[in-house]
Amino acid sequence: MGRAIRARDVDTVLADYPHSEWTGDDWIPGWRTAQAGRRQVNAYHDGPGEKDGLERYRLELQAAGYHVVPDQQPGGGRRRLHITRP
C-alpha cells in the first residue's frame, strides 16, 4: 500500500521547470499538479509539447524516489502522470 503524498511535495521536485498558469483566456505552458486522494497526485503539462514535458517530469520524479505511471484520462482525454510514494 502506498504512503500519503502531497501535491506540494511533488511541486518542489518540479520547481525548476516552468509552472503553468490560467490567464483567463488560455494556459501559460508548463506543469501543474492536482491532489487525487491521500495517496496520489496527478501531474499535467499544459501547452505544446505535452508528451515530451510529461516524460521529463516522469524521469525527474522517478529520480527523486517517486513511483510514476503515465496515464490518459478516459475517453481519449488529457495525458497525465499518476504519482505515488512506494
Image (cartoon, rainbow, N blue to C red):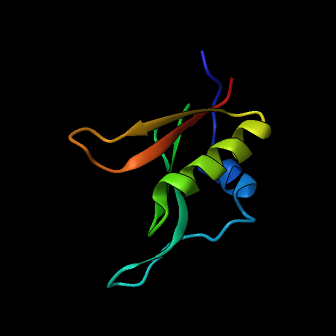
Above or below, 11 against 59 in this view is: below
Foreground pick, 14 / 54: 54
Q: Say which quadrant the N terminus sits in.
A: top right
Q: Is residue 69 left or right of residue 77?
A: right
Q: Say which quadrant the C terminus sits in.
A: top right
The picture places residue 40, in percent across and down from the top left corner, at: 53, 35
**Rendered residue at 55%/51% (across/down):** 54
The picture places residue 38, in percent across and down from the top left corner, at: 54, 34
Q: How many marks?
A: 0
Above or below, 44 against 42 in this view is: below
**Rendered residue at 45%/68% (across/down):** 48
Above or below, 14 against 82 in this view is: below
Q: Is residue 51 left or right of residue 61?
A: left
Q: Residue furthest left?
A: 75
The picture places residue 69, in percent across and down from the top left corner, at: 53, 32
Q: Residue furthest top?
A: 1
Residue 53 in which image quadrant = bottom right
The picture places residue 73, in percent across and down from the top left corner, at: 32, 42
Q: Is residue 74 left or right of residue 80?
A: left
Q: Residue furthest right?
A: 64
**Rendered residue at 32%/85% (across/down):** 25
Residue 52 in which image quadrant = bottom right
